[in-house]
Image (cartoon, grey):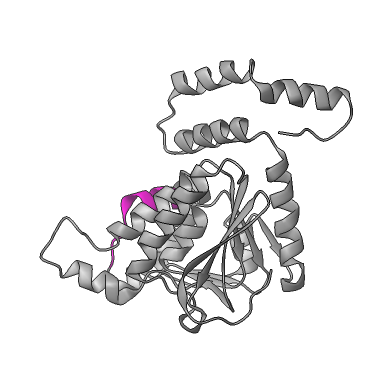
């Protein structure tokens, strides 16, 4: 992926065929997210959802880090605001949850370190492919911040209780091999192989049946939260048995060719 040095900006959307890429683009500050970036990310997510031609989303950063998380000054400003409805990090939480709920499959291309709230942003993606020099830490305990509940739930459901406690309560930095061991990374690769591995997975996802994947992703996420809508999942299953997708899938299998969804 081309990562030429550019002036700092809000997240950038690039579309190529069925793949959308969102690139965080404040490399001088390790792609630290500003408050104005959050609204822009929501707009980009809406745009991706509205485009049926987009089959997969890749989220990445410019430069030597994925992201340093949410701007701490913004958190402090919200924490001291007279408006108690705008709790610290609430706007960020909305963005992360929206990313997790996107219908298209999502890949986080971890081009470097991932810190603070951006560890949750990456965890909200379906897959995380990182370089072998990546590192991560969640500093909430050092900052005196009780992290928002949906983020804690995501850590526990993805990584398990013990790993969530280790990351949140110790606030210690861990390296890429440990990130892989605890299941934070889907795959770990040398930097020179990062794009090849992301491309490989993105092409697999882009070639599969989009409606079936969308429904199964929703069911998996609901199940992980302990809130599976079994009736809706069963309805999607029955509808898939009569869909154009399954007809094409069966035909392609019989003809020994890739399906064209």
Q: Position of residue 252 (x, y in %)?
A: 82, 27
Q: Position of residue 254 (x, y in %)?
A: 86, 22
The magenta span reads 145-155
Q: Position of residue 230 (x, y in %)?
A: 46, 21
Asked whether 249 or 107 is in front, the reply is: 249
Q: Quadrant of the N terminus?
A: bottom right
Q: Is residue 46 left or right of residue 200?
A: left
Q: Is residue 147 visible?
A: no
Determine whether 114 is above or below 98 in the image.
Answer: below
Single out the residue that lies furthest toward the right.
256
Q: Position of residue 145 (x, y in %)?
A: 28, 66
Q: Quadrant of the C terminus?
A: top right
Asked whether 165 or 21 is in front, the reply is: 21
Q: Is residue 13 visible?
A: yes
Query: Would residue 140 be counted in the magenta stretch?
Result: no
To which quarter of the image does residue 168 belong? Answer: bottom left
Q: Residue at x 28, y 72 (%)?
A: 74
**Total labels drawn:** 0
Asked whether 154 or 246 is in front, the reply is: 246
Determine whether 246 is above or below 76 in the image.
Answer: above
Asked whether 241 or 79 is in front, the reply is: 241
What main secondary structure does the magenta stretch of the protein show? helix
Single out the residue that lies furthest toward the left.
82
Determine whether 240 is above or below 213 in the image.
Answer: above
To which quarter of the image does residue 42 belong? Answer: bottom left
Q: Residue at x 12, y 61 (%)?
A: 83
Q: Is residue 17 left or right of residue 71?
A: right
Q: Residue at x 47, y 33 (%)?
A: 223
Q: Residue at x 51, y 31 (%)?
A: 219
């Amino acid at each position: 992926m081309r990562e030429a040095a550019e002036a700092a900006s809000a997240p950038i959307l690039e579309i190529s065929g069925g793949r959308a890429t969102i690139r965080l683009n404040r490399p001088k500050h390790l792609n630290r997210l500003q408050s104005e970036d959050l609204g822009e990310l929501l707009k980009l997510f809406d745009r991706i959802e509205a485009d049926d031609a987009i089959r997969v989303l890749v989220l990445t950063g410019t430069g030597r880090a994925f992201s340093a998380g949410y701007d701490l000054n913004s958190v402090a400003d919200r924490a001291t605001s007279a408006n108690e409805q705008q709790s610290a990090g609430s706007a960020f939480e909305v963005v992360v949850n929206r990313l997790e709920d996107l219908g298209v499959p999502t890949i986080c291309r971890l081009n470097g370190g991932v810190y603070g709230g951006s560890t949750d942003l990456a965890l909200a993606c379906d897959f995380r492919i990182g370089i072998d020099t990546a590192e991560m830490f969640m500093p909430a305990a050092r900052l005196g911040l009780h992290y928002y509940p949906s983020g804690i739930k995501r850590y526990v459901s993805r990584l398990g209780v013990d790993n969530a406690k280790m990351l949140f309560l110790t606030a210690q930095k861990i390296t890429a091999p440990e990130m892989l061991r605890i299941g934070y990374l889907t795959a770990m690769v040398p930097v020179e192989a990062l794009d090849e591995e992301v491309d490989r997975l993105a092409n697999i996802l882009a070639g599969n049946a989009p409606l079936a994947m969308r429904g199964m992703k929703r069911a998996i996420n609901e199940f992980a939260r302990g809130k599976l809508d079994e009736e809706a999942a069963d309805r999607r299953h029955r509808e898939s048995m009569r869909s154009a997708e399954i007809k094409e899938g069966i035909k392609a299998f019989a003809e020994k060719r890739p399906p064209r969804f």
